[in-house]
Every structure is written in structure tokens, then in C-alpha cells.
Image (tube, rainbow, N blue to C red):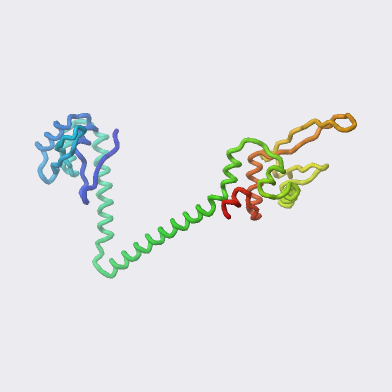
Amino acid sequence: MNLVQIENKNGNLVVSSRVVAEQLGKRHSDVLNKIKEICNEREFSLVGYVDAKGEKRPEALLVKDGFILLCMNYQGYNDFKRAYINEFNRMERELTQKKDSYMIEDPVERAKKWIAEQEEKKALQIEVQVKEQVIQEYKPRIEYLDTILKSQDTMTVTQIAADYGISAKRLNQILHDEKMQRKVGGQWLLYTDHMNRGYTRSETTEIRLKEGKNKLVINTKWTQKGRVKIHEILTELGIVANMDREKIA
């Protein structure tokens, strides 16, 4: 079933004979002849169109009554007929409601309605402008976040801190103050509430001591999900990434 194609021609709802022919799978010339045979001048109007060859051809624009009369001459196609009649009815109701909204006898009431409509339009325009301004203001600030989301690598706290122009020591202290991590045995570990959320990934490295012995060292690195969490914390504290700070300036 093709989409219903009813046009509003200056308040008159019409459907083209070409649309009917195409959607019913019939020759347009046959449909046009049938319209001329059974419909009167109030039920359709004859107009012209230019075909693919650049030649001018006739077509009929059927109003609702003409369309129904034409469909009565074709057996079947019930879904097609029902869809078009329902859409004719819906569009007619919509037109009636619009006409009724402007059929106010009292000129004062009509003026009040017009003023109210203009004020509503102005308020919507202001709202759109405000939203656009907010978007433009925040656009530079999310570029660093976009960079995070595009990356798949883990990073050390020193690397992340450098992106904000602060030291790793200060960043670790901030995350501690914000109840994100705590220090255990000389190593920063996440609080229980933040564990198993994919914020960090531990890597074990074997290092050679001066005494000739080997020692296993656990290094904690932050995943991209963890970087986003850190970004949220620092943003709340007013600490902006270098990349975004340059844009804002």
C-alpha cells in the first residue's frame, strides 16, 4: 500500500488522477477518461503537468466526492479506498478547526488572540536562541571528552593529570578527597563503591633491584571509562582540560 497523497490546494483537498492510476496499477489515460465520464465540474478540475519528456499532459484533481465516485467504479482495493477516505476526513477536521479558531466575532477577542499568538512565537524564538547560545558555550568544553571517548588505551594518573595542567600528586589527592580512592601499602586503590565498574586496570611489571633480585610491581592504570569519571569530578570542581581551556580563552 502506497502512502496517501492528498494535497491542500488553497484550502481545497484534492488527489491527482496520476496518483490514483499509479497506486491502482492502471493506465492514467483510462483513469482520466473514467473521471470525465462519471464526474461533474464540481467534483474535479482539469489541469496540466509536464511529463518526463517535457511534454504538457492533462491530469485531474479530484475532490473527496469525485474520488469516492471514481472508486465506486473499481471493485476491490478496499485498503486503498479506506486509507484515502480516512485521510480526507482527518484533513477536513483539521481545516475546520483552523477556520473555527479564527472565526471570532468580537474584534477585541480576535486582536487578543493574535497578540497571544505573536507573543508565543516570540517566546519560542527566544528559547531557541538561548539553547543555541548554551550549545555554543559548552561545545568547546566537551572536545576533551570527545577525545577520551575516541581512545581505547589505558593511561597513568600522571598522563591524565598532565591533560589538566596539574601534577599527579594533586590529582591523586583530589580523587582521595572526593572519596574515589584511598592509599593502601603505598598504592592507590579504589574505594569499594567504585570497584568492579571498569574504571581501572592493574598491570603487573617485574623490575630488577640493585641487589640482583626481581620484584613484582603492580601499576594501576585508568581506562577510558575511568577517565570520563575523573573528567566529571574535575569539571564539577571547575578544573578544565588544557584543550578546552584554550578554546574557552
Relative placement, left or right, of 34 versus 226 is left
The image shows a total of numbered marks equal to 0
Relative placement, left or right, of 29 versus 101 is left
Relative placement, left or right, of 179 versus 96 is right
Relative placement, left or right, of 41 versus 93 is left
Residue drawn at (69%, 42%) of the image: 159
Farthest bottom residue? 108
Image quadrant in which you'd find residue 58: top left
Residue drawn at (14%, 35%) of the image: 32
Q: Nearer the viewer, residue 228 or 170?
A: 170
Q: Nearer the viewer, residue 75 or 159?
A: 159
User: Residue 89, position in %: x, y?
Assistant: 25, 46
Determine whether 73 is above or below 121 in the image.
above
User: Residue 116, position in %: x, y?
Assistant: 35, 64
Image quadrant in which you'd find residue 217: top right
User: Residue 22, position in %: x, y?
Assistant: 23, 32
Residue drawn at (64%, 55%) of the image: 238
Figure quadrant of the C terminus = bottom right
Determine whether 38 is above or below 107 in the image.
above
Image quadrant in which you'd find residue 99: bottom left
User: Residue 213, position in %: x, y?
Assistant: 88, 29
Figure quadrant of the N terminus = top left
